[in-house]
Image: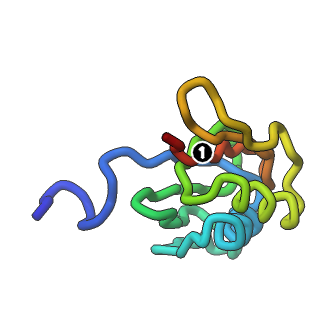
Amino acid sequence: MSMFKPESYPSLSPYLIVADAREVGRFLETVFDATILREHTREDGSVMHVEYRIDDSVVMMGEAQGDWASQPTHLHVYVPDAMAVYERALASGAEGVQPPEKKPDGDMRGGFKGPGGNTWWVATEQR
């Protein structure tokens, strides 16, 4: 039992600063079957902090405010079927960056840009 972090949380989680955390959250739920773990709002109703579980990982985010500007980034996620996730992302309004294809390292990998400008790279190991 860990005493320094919530049980079932990884030691490392990406933290995204986005313009609209609820929009990104809906995208994660649709594309990655993510589930919300917890959310804290500001007095004005904007999202101060929210966490989503994707498989064994946790993605944390907050909405841009003051000195904290939205900062798009790249994230890599292993999924059971990279092509299915890529197609679900495009159907949900994502912009294709690269269709999944077999790479020299053996992964089937591709990418798409979702809400908030983040680029999600999805991969399925293939042997």
Task: Give the image quarter of residue 31.
Answer: bottom right
Find residue 44 and report its horizontal and vertical position in percent: 70, 73
Q: Residue at x 30, y 48 (%)?
A: 11
Taking the spot 53% from the left edge, 75% from the top edge, the residue there is 35
| Residue 53 x %, y % | 48, 66
Relative horizontal placement of residue 35, taking residue 12 as reference (left or right): right
Identify whether 87 is placed above or below 71. Answer: below
Residue under label 1: 123
Quadrant holding the N terminus? bottom left
Q: Residue at x 86, y 58 (%)?
A: 90
Residue 21 in which image quadrant: bottom right
x and y, in percent, of residue 73 in the image: 67, 37
Q: Report if residue 70 is visible in the image.
A: no
Q: Is residue 54 left or right of residue 6?
A: right
Secondary structure at numbered mark 1: strand
- Name the side, left or right, on which 12 lies relative to 98: left
Task: Say which residue appears at 58% left-offset and 55% top-offset.
Answer: 61
